[in-house]
Image (cartoon, rainbow, N blue to C red):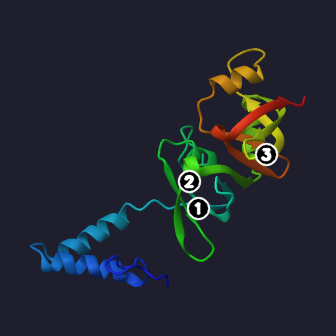
Amino acid sequence: MKAVPPGFGSAYGGALLSTCKQAVTNGTSSASLFDDQLLLMSDYRIEKSRCPVVVTTHSGETISGEMFLQPFGRHDGGMERPQDILNAAEPFFPLALSDEETVLLAKEQVVEVSVEFDPHDAVEYEMLSRPTVIEVRLTNGATHAGAIFLQLPLERPRLLDFLNRETLRFLTLHGTDRRLLINRRVIERVRPLD
Protein backbone atom coordinates (compact mmCIF):
# COMPACT_ATOMS: atom_id res chain seq x y z
CA MET A 1 0.00 0.00 0.00
CA LYS A 2 1.31 3.47 -0.92
CA ALA A 3 1.85 6.14 1.71
CA VAL A 4 -0.62 8.98 1.28
CA PRO A 5 -0.29 12.49 2.75
CA PRO A 6 -2.65 13.14 5.70
CA GLY A 7 -6.04 14.43 4.62
CA PHE A 8 -5.91 12.93 1.16
CA GLY A 9 -7.34 9.45 1.82
CA SER A 10 -6.23 6.44 -0.19
CA ALA A 11 -7.64 4.80 -3.30
CA TYR A 12 -6.19 1.50 -2.06
CA GLY A 13 -8.20 -0.75 0.24
CA GLY A 14 -11.34 1.38 -0.03
CA ALA A 15 -10.17 4.07 2.42
CA LEU A 16 -11.06 6.84 -0.04
CA LEU A 17 -14.52 5.37 -0.58
CA SER A 18 -15.16 5.13 3.15
CA THR A 19 -13.96 8.73 3.59
CA CYS A 20 -16.33 9.90 0.83
CA LYS A 21 -19.16 7.78 2.20
CA GLN A 22 -18.68 9.30 5.67
CA ALA A 23 -18.75 12.80 4.16
CA VAL A 24 -22.03 12.04 2.38
CA THR A 25 -23.53 10.39 5.49
CA ASN A 26 -22.53 13.33 7.71
CA GLY A 27 -24.03 15.83 5.28
CA THR A 28 -27.63 16.16 4.15
CA SER A 29 -27.44 13.22 1.70
CA SER A 30 -27.86 9.61 2.69
CA ALA A 31 -25.36 6.77 2.27
CA SER A 32 -27.80 4.97 -0.04
CA LEU A 33 -27.52 7.85 -2.52
CA PHE A 34 -23.74 7.37 -2.51
CA ASP A 35 -24.14 3.59 -3.03
CA ASP A 36 -26.54 4.23 -5.92
CA GLN A 37 -24.02 6.58 -7.55
CA LEU A 38 -21.24 3.98 -7.21
CA LEU A 39 -23.49 1.35 -8.78
CA LEU A 40 -24.40 3.71 -11.63
CA MET A 41 -20.73 4.46 -12.31
CA SER A 42 -19.85 0.76 -12.46
CA ASP A 43 -22.79 0.05 -14.81
CA TYR A 44 -21.26 2.43 -17.37
CA ARG A 45 -17.69 1.23 -16.99
CA ILE A 46 -15.98 0.57 -20.31
CA GLU A 47 -13.94 -2.63 -20.47
CA LYS A 48 -10.42 -2.06 -21.79
CA SER A 49 -7.52 -4.22 -22.83
CA ARG A 50 -3.92 -3.46 -21.90
CA CYS A 51 -1.05 -2.85 -24.30
CA PRO A 52 2.56 -3.08 -23.02
CA VAL A 53 4.62 0.02 -23.88
CA VAL A 54 7.89 1.70 -22.96
CA VAL A 55 7.63 5.48 -22.52
CA THR A 56 10.59 7.86 -22.65
CA THR A 57 10.02 11.31 -21.12
CA HIS A 58 11.77 14.67 -21.60
CA SER A 59 13.58 14.12 -18.29
CA GLY A 60 15.21 11.01 -19.79
CA GLU A 61 13.23 8.57 -17.66
CA THR A 62 12.16 5.31 -19.28
CA ILE A 63 8.90 3.90 -17.92
CA SER A 64 7.60 0.41 -18.73
CA GLY A 65 3.87 0.02 -18.33
CA GLU A 66 0.58 -0.70 -20.03
CA MET A 67 -1.78 1.63 -21.88
CA PHE A 68 -5.53 1.04 -21.62
CA LEU A 69 -7.23 0.47 -25.00
CA GLN A 70 -10.93 0.40 -25.76
CA PRO A 71 -12.15 -2.44 -28.01
CA PHE A 72 -13.98 -0.01 -30.32
CA GLY A 73 -12.33 3.37 -29.89
CA ARG A 74 -11.26 4.38 -33.39
CA HIS A 75 -13.22 6.40 -35.91
CA ASP A 76 -13.23 3.48 -38.37
CA GLY A 77 -14.74 1.08 -35.84
CA GLY A 78 -11.55 -0.85 -35.13
CA MET A 79 -9.83 -1.38 -31.81
CA GLU A 80 -8.21 1.66 -30.23
CA ARG A 81 -4.42 1.86 -30.67
CA PRO A 82 -1.78 3.64 -28.56
CA GLN A 83 -1.34 6.29 -31.27
CA ASP A 84 -5.08 7.03 -31.10
CA ILE A 85 -4.73 7.83 -27.39
CA LEU A 86 -1.55 9.89 -27.82
CA ASN A 87 -3.02 11.88 -30.71
CA ALA A 88 -6.33 12.58 -28.96
CA ALA A 89 -6.97 16.10 -27.63
CA GLU A 90 -6.73 15.21 -23.92
CA PRO A 91 -3.38 16.38 -22.46
CA PHE A 92 -2.88 13.37 -20.12
CA PHE A 93 -3.18 9.58 -20.41
CA PRO A 94 -3.08 6.81 -17.78
CA LEU A 95 -0.24 4.29 -17.67
CA ALA A 96 -0.47 1.17 -15.49
CA LEU A 97 2.83 0.27 -13.86
CA SER A 98 3.96 -3.20 -12.81
CA ASP A 99 3.36 -2.55 -9.10
CA GLU A 100 -0.41 -2.10 -9.62
CA GLU A 101 -0.03 1.68 -9.59
CA THR A 102 -1.39 3.90 -12.34
CA VAL A 103 0.24 7.22 -13.20
CA LEU A 104 -1.11 10.00 -15.39
CA LEU A 105 1.46 11.16 -17.96
CA ALA A 106 1.41 14.54 -19.72
CA LYS A 107 1.60 13.90 -23.46
CA GLU A 108 3.71 17.03 -24.01
CA GLN A 109 6.39 15.58 -21.70
CA VAL A 110 6.60 12.29 -23.64
CA VAL A 111 9.44 12.04 -26.16
CA GLU A 112 8.55 8.61 -27.54
CA VAL A 113 6.51 5.50 -26.86
CA SER A 114 7.70 2.09 -28.03
CA VAL A 115 4.96 -0.46 -28.82
CA GLU A 116 5.23 -4.07 -29.97
CA PHE A 117 4.58 -4.62 -33.67
CA ASP A 118 0.96 -5.47 -34.54
CA PRO A 119 0.63 -7.29 -37.89
CA HIS A 120 -3.00 -6.17 -38.23
CA ASP A 121 -1.88 -2.54 -38.26
CA ALA A 122 0.70 -3.29 -40.95
CA VAL A 123 -1.91 -4.77 -43.27
CA GLU A 124 -4.19 -1.78 -42.73
CA TYR A 125 -1.43 0.73 -43.46
CA GLU A 126 -0.14 -1.15 -46.50
CA MET A 127 -3.59 -1.24 -48.06
CA LEU A 128 -4.26 2.47 -47.62
CA SER A 129 -0.91 4.14 -48.22
CA ARG A 130 2.63 4.08 -49.56
CA PRO A 131 5.56 3.23 -47.24
CA THR A 132 8.59 5.49 -47.11
CA VAL A 133 11.72 4.58 -45.12
CA ILE A 134 13.16 7.48 -43.13
CA GLU A 135 15.65 8.36 -40.41
CA VAL A 136 14.45 10.65 -37.63
CA ARG A 137 16.87 12.59 -35.40
CA LEU A 138 15.48 13.93 -32.14
CA THR A 139 16.53 17.01 -30.16
CA ASN A 140 18.03 14.74 -27.48
CA GLY A 141 20.42 13.25 -30.09
CA ALA A 142 18.59 9.91 -30.51
CA THR A 143 18.23 8.62 -34.06
CA HIS A 144 15.60 6.15 -35.25
CA ALA A 145 14.98 4.55 -38.64
CA GLY A 146 11.78 2.96 -39.89
CA ALA A 147 8.88 3.33 -42.27
CA ILE A 148 6.08 5.84 -42.31
CA PHE A 149 3.03 5.46 -44.48
CA LEU A 150 2.16 8.43 -46.65
CA GLN A 151 -1.61 8.71 -46.57
CA LEU A 152 -2.11 11.63 -48.90
CA PRO A 153 -4.76 11.75 -51.60
CA LEU A 154 -2.10 12.42 -54.21
CA GLU A 155 -0.88 10.12 -56.93
CA ARG A 156 2.74 10.51 -55.79
CA PRO A 157 2.74 11.75 -52.18
CA ARG A 158 5.90 13.49 -51.00
CA LEU A 159 7.51 13.16 -47.59
CA LEU A 160 7.68 16.95 -47.18
CA ASP A 161 3.95 17.29 -47.87
CA PHE A 162 3.16 14.54 -45.38
CA LEU A 163 5.25 16.12 -42.62
CA ASN A 164 3.87 19.62 -43.23
CA ARG A 165 0.21 18.63 -43.60
CA GLU A 166 -0.06 16.03 -40.87
CA THR A 167 -1.34 17.64 -37.67
CA LEU A 168 -1.17 14.67 -35.29
CA ARG A 169 0.93 15.17 -32.15
CA PHE A 170 2.83 11.86 -32.54
CA LEU A 171 4.46 10.46 -35.68
CA THR A 172 4.23 6.67 -36.04
CA LEU A 173 7.50 5.09 -37.18
CA HIS A 174 7.15 1.39 -38.10
CA GLY A 175 10.07 -0.95 -37.44
CA THR A 176 10.39 -4.68 -38.02
CA ASP A 177 9.44 -5.68 -34.48
CA ARG A 178 8.24 -2.44 -32.83
CA ARG A 179 6.37 0.74 -33.57
CA LEU A 180 7.78 3.99 -32.25
CA LEU A 181 5.41 6.88 -31.55
CA ILE A 182 7.50 10.05 -31.62
CA ASN A 183 6.39 13.43 -30.30
CA ARG A 184 6.64 15.79 -33.30
CA ARG A 185 7.85 18.64 -31.07
CA VAL A 186 11.14 16.80 -30.43
CA ILE A 187 11.94 15.99 -34.07
CA GLU A 188 15.03 17.89 -35.18
CA ARG A 189 15.26 16.51 -38.71
CA VAL A 190 14.00 13.78 -41.02
CA ARG A 191 16.05 12.14 -43.79
CA PRO A 192 14.57 9.86 -46.46
CA LEU A 193 16.42 6.54 -46.78
CA ASP A 194 14.73 5.12 -49.90
SS label for mark 1: strand
Q: Which residue is mark 1?
A: 49
User: Residue 141, which numbered label?
Assistant: 3
* Quadrant that contains the C terminus: top right
* Coordinates of residue 2 in the picture (x, y in percent): 49, 81
Mark toward the start of the polypeptide (3 vs 1): 1
Q: Is residue 193 left or right of residue 98?
A: right
Whether pointer 3 and pointer 2 mark residues with C-beta atoms closer than 8 Å, the reply is: no
Residue 26 image offset from top left, x and y in percent? 14, 80
Report the mark closest to the observer, 3 or 2. 3
| Label 3 secondary element | loop
Q: Residue sitting at 89 percent across and 31 percent down?
A: 193
How far apart are labels 1 and 2 at the CA level? 7 Å
Q: Quadrant of residue 150?
A: top right
Asked if the residue under mark 2 is in contact with the one under mark 1, i.e. CB atoms within 8 Å, the reply is yes
Which label's residue is closer to the chain start, 3 or 2? 2
| Mark sitting on residue 184 | none
Q: Spatial distance from mark 3 to mark 2, Cα to Cα?
A: 36 Å
Instruction: From the top left corner, tell me how far across and down residue 80 is, in percent.
Output: 58, 49
Q: CA distance from mark 3 to mark 1?
A: 34 Å
Amino acid residing under circle 2:
Pro
